[in-house]
Amino acid sequence: MRDVHTLNSRSAAVKKNLDYPVIDADAHVLECEWALLDYVRDIGGPKIAEKFEKGGRPGYTSKHRSMFWAAPSGKYTIDRATCMLPRLYAERLEDAGIDFAIIYTTYGISANQVRDDEMRQVLARSLNTLYAEMFDDVKDRMTPSAIIPTWTPKEAMDELDYVVNTLGLKTITISGEVRDAVPEVAAVDPKLGELTQRVTSICMEPRDGNDYDPFWQKCVDLGVLPAGHSGAQKTARRQSPDCYSFNRLGTFSVGNEFFARSLFFSGVLKRFPTLNFAFLEGGVAWATQLYNDLMEIYEKRNLEWIYEHQDPSKLDVALMEEMFERYGNMPYMTAEKWRGCQELPQSQKIETRPMNDYEASGVTSREDIRDQFVPNFYYGAEADDKMTALAFDRKLNHFGVKLKAVFSSDIGHWDVPDMSGVLHEAWEMVEQETINEDDFKEFVFTNTAEMHTKMNPDFYQGTVVEDAVAKVMAEKRPKGSASAAE
């Protein structure tokens, strides 16, 4: 009988020196497609199952090079089997130095963008039922994340209710955007419309005037954190038919940035201040850029500054004429030309549309940006991502904040052929002094414990990390609070 364990792995050696558990915020399952077909047949019926078989895997087209040969093989065959068999997975987490793992979809990332409404909803229900049954007997070591299609608020709420109240799942995977056909084209020719793409946010000016607030409220009520887990592949700038790496680079950071930016400007963060969000697989470099950009653009685009310094009615026309008279050096750059152009150019006309970009968000200061952006956003960063250190750089980030990066192994995908090395790869940031040991604890334990427990205090109940999570959460509560006293 073969030994399934990686003896004396580097990650296990790192783990032995830690006095706290390691929680993997984003490992993956490799779905058995023959098993998924059975669930599709049971849930959707024979016709939808036949359609599923004929259609092939979502997202794979000749016009776009998608992920291929993306599972461990050769000497890493054991890792491939691990990600398909939850009991083996749970047994081998020790080799990776991991105590508990939150398991995310592989198949569902593309399934969430299937345009056929029935097929998309059947795939989500099938995957979720499959996950619930697959991982039922390893709940102490891992928990799967449910797929929630978000093309409409109703389909999102229906599936959310089912996965929590019927299947008992505790966290969800969503896409922050919808990629449908351009409606004007589809109205003329549906087949031609299928060759087009319109990308719309589910929170910033969503398509058809949909209101997703009832969905966000349902997440709060059920204590479920929505994890954005979709990239920007198959969008306009990532459409190479031959080069997967060209399409893959930056895809998750671009998708996550769009989702986070939409949440902020649409006011979702203001209306649902207790709702946490995770943005997975894109790292945290994009988030540090967005956070600091928001601070800097607000300084010059807040309403008070605009009226004070850019109001066209305050333009000193006499000064403009004088400067054109003195310095104009082309036939059309003269004071006379300036005087003759009394009709304000388009860019200087009084706006009739809303002018306060921050009205929906309720932001009236840079402090408001910090207080909305920092507390409830969590960023999945992979072990070999050196840019993770940016999250912990108080000198870099406005107001000296740290962003909440969470250790995300990506076990199961092509970039992690050997699961026994991931924790050690993350520890290299400490060895290279780009983060310190306290930062590392936040990265591999505290932040992931917090992001789910703040939404659902019982998230880790019955798991091997239950006591450690309860202890660290008690330490984080303000002294003298009722919860701390308990």
Image: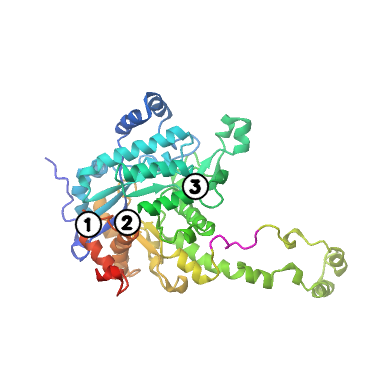
Circle 1 sits in a helix, a strand or a loop, which is it?
loop
Q: Earlier in the sequence, mark 1 or mark 3?
A: 1
On the question of residue 413 being in view, the answer is: no
The answer to whether the residue labelled 1 contacts the one labelled 3, judged by CB atoms less than 8 Å apart, is no
Instruction: Determine which of the numbered discs, if any, sits on residue 97 in the image.
Output: 1
Q: What is the x, y in percent for residue 243?
A: 46, 43
**Which residue has dot 2 on it?**
456
Left or right of 377 in this view: 298 = right
**Which residue has dot 3 on it?**
177
Mark whose residue sits in front, 2 or 3: 2
- Position of residue 422 relative to residue 330, above or below, is above
Circle 2 sits in a helix, a strand or a loop, which is it?
loop
Q: Earlier in the sequence, mark 2 or mark 3?
A: 3
The magenta stretch is 354-361
Q: Amino acid at mark 1?
A: Gly
Q: Residues within 10 Å of mark 1 (few under 14, many from 20)?
A: many
Residue 87's image quarter?
A: top left
Spatial CA distance of label 1 from label 3 is 35 Å
Circle 3 sits in a helix, a strand or a loop, which is it?
strand
Q: Residues within 10 Å of mark 2 (few under 14, many from 20)?
A: some
Spatial CA distance of label 2 from label 3 is 25 Å
Q: Nearer the viewer, residue 32 or 247?
A: 32
Q: Quadrant of the C terminus?
A: bottom left
- Position of residue 292 relative to residue 452, above or below, is below
Q: Amino acid at mark 2?
A: Asn
